[in-house]
Image (cartoon, rainbow, N blue to C red):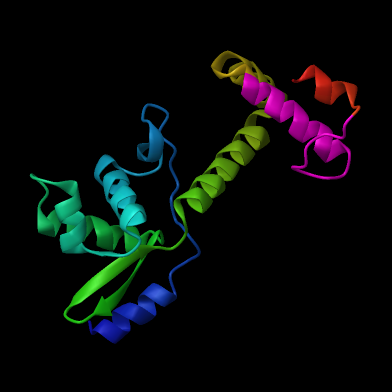
Amino acid sequence: MTASALNRLDERAAEPSSLHAFKLDREGLARVFGELEATVMDAVWTQGEASVLQVADALGDGSHYKTVMTVMNRLVDKGVLERRRRSRAFVYRARETREAFRARVSQRVVEGLLRDFGDVAVAQFVETLEGVDPRLLARLRRLVDAHEGGVPGAPPRSGDAAGKAGE
């Protein structure tokens, strides 16, 4: 397949991304990627745009060029990386920022939990927030207060009793 045909395929790739699994027994990006995929994505996000050789170098000793190339091409197929030819090599970049990716994955996970488990998911979310970091529960309270006040994401209005209770 020619480079221009590959580029056309990349341009037609589905919206980011075709990831379908969330692994509860993993941490960080490895919850949605394989371990090596997560490491590769981290390297690409850090570098902004990188060739296979640059990513393999960033991964350090023990990384094999062909393995890294295979993983990066699979990430293109999954819609999270895009590639373009630069000189004799391809360079890859993420289709969205790390922050946008995390926000989109989080939204899909929360949406699925709420759709499948409803009130139980909400109760567990609140209980978990309180156990992990009470400040996050206070932040949630402020977000809910602001949302109910008609300004999603805005800080609560001064003088709101609920806003003061969360401080």
Span colored in magenta: 135-158
- Considering only vertical position in the picture, is 134 above or below 39? above
For residue 57: magenta? no
- Considering only vertical position in the picture, is 141 above or below 90? above
Instruction: Depth check: give the residue in front, 106 or 97.
Output: 97
Q: Position of residue 117 (x, y in %)?
A: 65, 28
Q: Which residue corresponds to the image point at 81% horizontal and 17% vertical from the top-left?
A: 165
For residue 140: magenta? yes
Instruction: Depth check: give the residue in front, 69 or 53.
Output: 53
Q: Position of residue 71 (x, y in %)?
A: 24, 55
Q: Position of residue 55 (x, y in %)?
A: 21, 56
Split into 4 quadrants, where in the image is the N terminus?
bottom left
Q: Which residue corresponds to the image point at 89% horizontal and 21% vertical from the top-left?
A: 161
Left or right placement of residue 84 versus residue 167 in this view: left
Which picture quadrant has residue 158? top right
Split into 4 quadrants, where in the image is the C terminus?
top right
